[in-house]
């Protein structure tokens, strides 16, 4: 007997249709169009595009700017994801131990999740302002030491910090909930056997937390590849030079600033393949991990 | 589903409304601040002056954003009748097939009355004028009288050599920012090359064919960029990134910097902030070089295709209104943009107002535009030029922050620019320069 609540297939279809339509219109259709455009040279104002085969791919792949922004994207993913998870893990471990203020911290740490990337970007622009911000006193002593407006490394660091800051809340929730599923008895038993706090983290909590850690890594990688757009657009516009032009921002500037729809579509396809490849590598790695459960 | 229905019905109502009142048109522009306010004033004045048409003026935040939105709107067949596009987009628009030349749409207007510098920028080889020059500006030198007077400088420097001497004096007197620039190619490349009679690309900056090649990385422009880098390193000039406000014009208007090269269109804001402390002069030259004309900057109004005759009539009426002498003079007085026609200039002089401080840019700007022209100072007709400006900024910033040598940065910018030109050529293969 079918375990159903509704009768007839049409009702199912009707109930599922809205979300399918949304996914189709806002995901599969644009992705399909990006694939399509990547084989054409598209005029900015429309009115005729010509088939150029793989020429767009050849152009993008031979462009040094594409590779440097891909490398920067990779570096950004590594840095932002690692710090975003590491700091969240430290906070989660602390909150899990039930030290004073941890109940409040659990609440407060989740709030930043509700702030849009662009707003965070604007706030951090003020915080890192070379004349008014946090490091302004440093500049008083050593003029020109800190200036993310013109120094590429400074600018890259500000975007990484902002991204880490936005990533922490979500990772924190996932990791904390993971920690809380670990049976208390295990920790207590270990403590009675004389295991130090650090020992308990290393030998009990971290191994039992691997599923959550893996999840946050996968999500962070995808997130840091496609998410920093709002930050970059408000904080650096990809500059100075192209030091903060990650691939996601380059696609936007090429497509909308420079009317290079074909190039932008081609890079979208390549970015998608890149992210998929990264995630596949991670799933490969995951197979090697033996969950201790 | 309910939401979709609501949206659908809202759209239906909206389109019904436009159909019912066909002479209700939109004009999109990119300016902000003092200039935006003046544009809105013109719209209100037009709507009040007659009852047949109604124009709604919509600000898009910046020239670049306005152009992006216009492209998207045109592709969706929702483009406004009138659209303000900036100088750099000229060739892209010319070949887009999305615009109708104003001289075709309004054949009875005496377009020859427009300043030569404006015409040459927006005219096809056949002599059609593509768009109606609107907020035309050019590059001038701004100085802060009070700051300059501190070290006994009474007049603005006419040459870069003198400018740097002055900068040194100012710096010694404790003024940290004698001169500021944003390093934008409109200032340091296009206007600089034009008034020094140098080309930035072969084929007379692209006027003679789509197969032009960038050439600015050798010669006087390259020397100038090297100098800017050396002067910045010596602390004699500042990039806008080194200033407190982060914007070269704001740095001048707040009294942080003593001099800037800026558009006449910024005069309204500068005068509002500094009053008669603002002194202006022709943009500096290098010693021993003959001065040629500067280019018309700012933007012009284009008629976009795909509209009904009634909408076009409304668009034309608004263009006629903006072209009126009194309207041009009023707009110039509020913003610092230049009167764009000979008759408007005559009318301004006849009105006896040309001596007023708010019209100070008009005579100077027109003088600068009217210096002897060469084949290379007509304008810039290079494809994907908006993107090239980004490339130029990006590469030269790398030189300013020490990532690479200036010459290398210029060579790289030229190389990437040439790739853009070749792709443009291919995108519009078969299209000839009209």
Image (cartoon, rainbow, N blue to C red):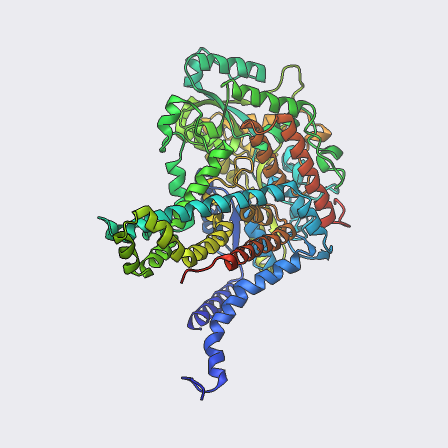
Q: Nearer the viewer, residue A250 or B372?
A: A250
- Residue A243: image quadrant is top right
Q: Nearer the viewer, residue B16 or A101?
A: A101
Figure quadrant of the C terminus of chain A = bottom left
Q: Nearer the viewer, residue B37 or B329?
A: B37
A200 sits to left or right of B61: left
> Where in the figure is residue A244, as x and y percent of width and height?
52, 40
B356 sits to left or right of B126: left
Relative vertical location of residue A115 with respect to residue B15 in this rendering, above or below: above
A58 sits to left or right of B318: right
Figure quadrant of the N terminus of chain A = bottom left
Q: Seen from this angle, which residue lies furthest bottom?
A: A1
Q: Seen from this angle, which residue lies furthest front?
A: A193
> Where in the figure is residue A124, as x and y percent of width and height?
39, 40
Q: Residue at x 67, y 50 (%)?
A: B96
B93 sits to left or right of B178: right
> Where in the figure is residue B291, as x and y percent of width and height?
65, 21
> Where in the figure is residue B287, as x and y percent of width and height?
63, 15
Q: Seen from this angle, which residue lies furthest top?
A: B152
Q: Nearer the viewer, residue A263 or B147?
A: A263
Q: Residue at x 49, y 19 (%)?
A: B235
Is residue B78 at all visible to an observer of this figure? Answer: yes
Q: Residue at x 46, y 35 (%)?
A: B334
Q: Seen from this angle, which residue lies furthest left?
A: A100
């Amino acid at each position: 007997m079918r375990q159903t609540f509704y009768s007839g297939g049409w009702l199912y279809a009707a109930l599922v249709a809205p979300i399918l339509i949304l996914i189709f219109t806002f995901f599969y259709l644009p992705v399909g169009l990006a694939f399509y455009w990547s084989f054409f040279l598209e005029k900015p104002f429309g009115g005729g595009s010509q088939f150029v085969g793989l020429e767009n791919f050849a152009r993008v792949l031979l462009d040094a700017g594409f590779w440097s922004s891909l490398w920067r994207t990779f570096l950004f993913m590594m840095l932002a994801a690692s710090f975003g998870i590491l700091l969240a893990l430290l906070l989660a471990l602390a909150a899990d131990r039930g030290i004073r203020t941890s109940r409040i911290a659990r609440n407060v740490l989740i709030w930043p999740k509700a702030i849009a990337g662009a707003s965070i970007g604007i706030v951090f622009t003020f915080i890192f302002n070379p004349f008014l911000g946090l490091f302004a006193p440093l500049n008083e002593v050593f003029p020109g030491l800190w200036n993310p407006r013109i120094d590429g490394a400074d600018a890259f660091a500000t975007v990484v910090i902002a991204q880490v800051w936005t990533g922490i809340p979500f990772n924190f929730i996932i990791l904390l909930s993971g920690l809380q599923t670990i049976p208390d008895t295990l920790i207590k038993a270990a403590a009675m056997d004389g295991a130090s706090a650090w020992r308990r983290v290393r030998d009990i909590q971290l191994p039992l937390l691997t599923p959550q850690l893996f999840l946050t890594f996968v999500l962070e990688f995808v997130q840091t590849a496609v998410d920093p757009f709002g930050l970059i657009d408000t904080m650096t516009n990809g500059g100075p030079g192209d030091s903060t032009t990650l691939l996601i921002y380059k696609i936007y500037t090429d497509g909308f600033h420079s009317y290079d729809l074909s190039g932008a579509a081609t890079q979208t396809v390549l970015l998608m393949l890149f992210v998929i490849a990264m995630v596949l590598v991670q799933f490969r790695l995951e197979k090697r991990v033996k969950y201790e459960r | 589903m309910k939401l979709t229905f609501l949206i659908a019905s809202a759209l239906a109502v909206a389109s019904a409304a436009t159909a019912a009142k066909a002479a209700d048109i939109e004009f999109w522009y990119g300016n902000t601040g003092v200039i935006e306010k003046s544009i809105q004033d013109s719209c209100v004045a037009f709507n009040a002056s007659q009852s047949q048409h109604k124009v709604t003026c919509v600000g898009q935040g910046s020239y670049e954003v306005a152009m992006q939105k216009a492209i998207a709107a045109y592709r969706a067949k929702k483009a406004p009748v009138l659209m303000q596009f900036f100088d750099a987009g000229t060739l892209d628009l010319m070949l887009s097939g999305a615009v109708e030349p104003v001289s075709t749409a309004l054949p009875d207007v005496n377009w020859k009355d427009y300043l030569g510098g404006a015409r040459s920028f927006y005219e096809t080889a056949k002599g059609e004028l593509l768009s109606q020059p609107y907020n035309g500006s050019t590059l001038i030198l701004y100085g802060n009288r009070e700051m300059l007077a501190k070290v006994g400088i009474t007049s603005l420097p006419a040459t870069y050599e003198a400018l740097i001497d002055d900068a040194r004096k100012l710096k010694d007197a404790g003024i940290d920012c004698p001169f500021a620039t944003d390093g934008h190619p409109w200032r340091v490349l296009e206007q600089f090359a034009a008034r020094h009679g140098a080309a930035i690309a072969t084929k007379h900056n692209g006027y003679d064919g789509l197969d032009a090649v960038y050439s600015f990385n050798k010669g006087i422009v390259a020397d100038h960029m090297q100098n800017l880098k050396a002067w910045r390193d010596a602390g004699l000039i500042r990039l806008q990134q080194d200033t407190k406000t982060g914007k070269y014009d704001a740095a001048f208007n707040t009294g942080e910097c003593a001099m800037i090269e800026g558009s006449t269109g910024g005069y309204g804001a500068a005068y509002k902030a500094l009053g008669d402390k603002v002194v202006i002069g022709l943009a500096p030259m290098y010693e021993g070089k003959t001065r040629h004309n500067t280019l018309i900057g700012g933007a012009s109004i284009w008629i976009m295709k795909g509209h009904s005759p009634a909408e076009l009539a409304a668009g034309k009426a608004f263009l006629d209104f903006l072209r009126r002498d009194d309207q041009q003079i009023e707009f110039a007085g509020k913003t610092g943009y230049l009167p764009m026609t000979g008759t408007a200039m005559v009318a301004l002089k006849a009105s006896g107002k040309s001596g007023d401080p708010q019209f100070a840019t008009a005579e100077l700007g027109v003088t600068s535009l009217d210096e002897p022209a060469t084949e290379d100072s007509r304008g810039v007709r290079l494809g994907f030029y908006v993107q090239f400006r980004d490339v130029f900024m990006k590469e030269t910033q790398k030189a300013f922050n020490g990532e690479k040598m200036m010459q290398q940065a210029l060579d790289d910018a030229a190389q990437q620019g040439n790739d853009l030109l070749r792709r443009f050529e291919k995108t519009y293969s078969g299209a000839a320069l009209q």
